[in-house]
């Protein structure tokens, strides 16, 4: 499915609707350029999973955990990682085997480490402020 989002609010709405289809163990690979809407999408996932506190980018911390909603949400950002060993350092595989939803920004950096059933979501910057989201 392809969605066109005119703003960050619409991106969050698309993600919130999509979150209602997710179950424990779901892994989402978010792929797109800087500022393409990946973190806004995760904010919408959190809303759709009934998490009500602020969601921020984990660029410098690598993982943010959001608990207290319908399912835990594990928001990862692989942008700053230089090699695969760093995935092991923060417990990447343990998160994937957990009981929540893993949303992995820059998932294309280490494709060999992704589960075979990952749901890839591609973000493309369109004209003006639009974003194209391919689920």
Image (spheres, rainbow, N blue to C red):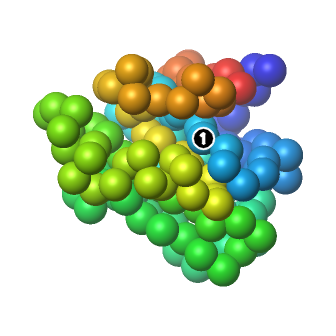
Q: Is residue 32 left or right of residue 72?
A: left
Q: Is residue 121 visible to us here?
A: no
Using the image, determine if residue 57 lies above or below residue 39.
Answer: below
Using the image, determine if residue 100 lies above or below residue 81.
Answer: below
Look at 63% across and 67% down and name the residue there.
72
Looking at the rendering, in which quadrant would you find the C terminus? top right
Residue 95 location (% of width, % of height)? 48, 54
Q: Which residue is mark 1?
A: 27
Q: Is residue 60 left or right of residue 78?
A: left
Residue 113 occupies quadrant: top left
Residue situated in front as seen by the camera: 16 or 115: 115
Residue situated in front as seen by the camera: 19 or 41: 19
Residue situated in front as seen by the camera: 133 or 85: 85
Looking at the rendering, in which quadrant would you find the N terminus? top right
Q: Secondary structure at mark 1?
A: strand
Counting every numbered tag in the picture gives 1
Look at 78% across and 48% down and name the residue there.
22
Residue 83 occupies quadrant: top left
Residue 8 location (% of width, % of height)? 61, 48
Residue 37 location (% of width, % of height)? 52, 39
Q: Is residue 19 visible to us here?
A: yes
Residue 74 location (% of width, % of height)? 51, 58
Using the image, determine if residue 66 lies above or below residue 61.
Answer: below
Question: Is disc 1 surrounded by few (<14), some (14 to 19) or many (20+) residues within 10 Å?
Answer: many
């Amino acid at each position: 499915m392809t969605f066109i989002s005119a703003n960050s609010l619409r991106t969050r709405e698309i993600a919130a609707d999509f979150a209602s289809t997710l179950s424990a163990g779901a892994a989402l690979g978010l792929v797109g350029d800087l500022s393409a809407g990946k973190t806004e999408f995760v904010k919408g996932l959190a809303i759709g999973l009934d998490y009500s506190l602020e969601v921020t980018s984990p660029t410098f911390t690598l993982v943010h955990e959001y608990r207290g909603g319908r399912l835990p949400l594990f928001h990862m950002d692989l942008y700053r990682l230089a090699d695969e060993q760093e995935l092991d350092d923060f417990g990447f595989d343990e998160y994937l085997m957990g009981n929540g939803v893993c949303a992995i920004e820059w998932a294309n950096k280490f494709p060999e480490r992704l589960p075979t059933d990952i749901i890839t979501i591609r973000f493309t910057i369109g004209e003006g402020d639009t974003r194209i989201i391919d689920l």
